[in-house]
Structure formats: structure tokens, C-alpha cells
Image: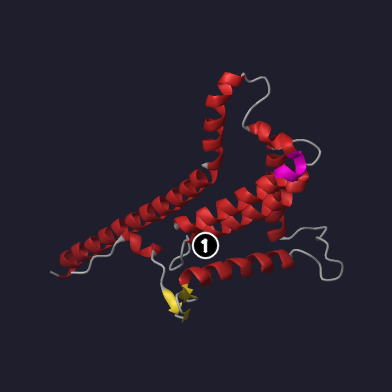
Amino acid sequence: MNFFSPLEQFEILPIFSFSFGVLDFSITNQTVILSLILFFIFTLFFTLVKETDSSLYIVPHRWQSVIEFIYLMILSMVNDNIGGKKNQYFLPLIFTIFFFVASMNLIGLVPYSFTVTSHFIVTLSLSTAIFIGLNIISIRLHGIKFFSLFLPSGTSFILAFLLVPVELISFFFKPLSLAIRLFCNMMAGHTLLKVFVGFAWSLMSLSGVFFYYIIFL
């Protein structure tokens, strides 16, 4: 009797094995999916511009309309949350992160594909890299005022001994919480879909057997 676990879809399988000493450079299904995502993103955005002057089309086609809708949505989110005169400086970064993560999530819905964001190491690496980069940008923009995030102005000296450690812990746990949130949502969602599909397949099989006995017996 074969037992198929809904967690088998998250297994990383090597396609071409290659190792050098203790280092493993094997090409896995995760590597293939990430390569396909990058190829899809570059191909999509290169098809949006004209070959002559690299500008957008005046009359947008279907894909350009979709990208413009996403762009306006993210632009509105940036204006509402960041504010200030330099808010649009962060728009390319946020737009790229959104499109990359959305592509990794959506490609996992394709049958016989692989959900890259269902692995904690992927989401943790992505959130940590973004966290470090944004902190570097913030320190370059605000200088020493950046550290006022942990001790707001007007806070008493006694309250600072309690407030600063709490703010530091919550600040440095942000990439971990974001990584866990995305990882758990993708794994739980795809596992639930797999279970529902298994139930539907079992019901279809039982219905076929039932109608077979009614018609032919």
C-alpha cells in the first residue's frame, strides 16, 4: 500500500549532482524554478518597452496594463506609508521585492512545480538581506538620528532601561517574524490544497466504482 504525503511537494530533489569537497553545487528543482522566475521577469519587462527608444507604449497592451496597475498600487502604498519628498526613491526596491516574491508564490500553484517560499531558509535569507540593506540606507540618510527609533524623544532616563531592550528585541526579530509568516502561510496553504485535491480524487474514484457496479453488474 502506497502512502502519499502532502508534504512530498516541498522536497528538494537534485537534478544534476555536482560537489567539490564539502561544497555541494548540485542543480535542484529549486534552482530550476528560481531560474525560470528570473527568466520570466526579465522577459516580461523587456517586452514592455519599445526596441527603438526603450519607452513604454502609448496604447498599453494587456501585460503593460497589468504591470501599470501593480505599479500604481505599490506607488500608492509607498506614498501612504513612507511619505516625505524622497518616498519614491524606495519605489524601485519595493516594486522589485513585491514582484519577485509574488512570482515565487504564484509559480507554486502550477501543477508539478515547486514552491520556493515554502522553505524557511529562502524566506529568512530574503528578509535578512532586505533588513540589512534597509538599515544601511536608513543610517546613511538619517545618521545618528536613526538610533532615536529605539529611544523616542521625551523618554525618561529610568524608562529607557526598560524601553530600549524591548525595542531592540522587537526590531531585530522583524526579519525572523516576516520569514516565519511567509514560510508558514505558503506551506500551510499548499498542504491544504494538496489535501483537498486528494479528497476530490478519492471521491471521484469512489463515484466511478459505484457507477461501474450500477451499470455493468
Q: Position of residue 53 (x, y in %)?
A: 87, 67
Q: Residue at x 74, y 36 (%)?
A: 83
| Identity of the residue drawn at 29% across and 56% down | 199
Magenta segment, principal secondary structure?
Answer: helix
Which image quadrant is residue 202 in? bottom left
Q: Is residue 139 magenta?
A: yes
Snapshot colouring = secondary structure
In the rendering, at what x and y percent does residue 37 appear? 58, 66
Q: Is residue 157 visible?
A: yes
- Range of residues picked out in magenta: 138-143
Quarter of the rendering occupied by the C terminus = bottom left
Location of mark 1 (residue): 107
User: Going 44% across and 66% down the picture, which residue do you hit?
Assistant: 111
Residue 158 figure quarter: top right
On the picture, is 168 further left or further right than 185? right
List the single residue furthest toward the right. Answer: 53
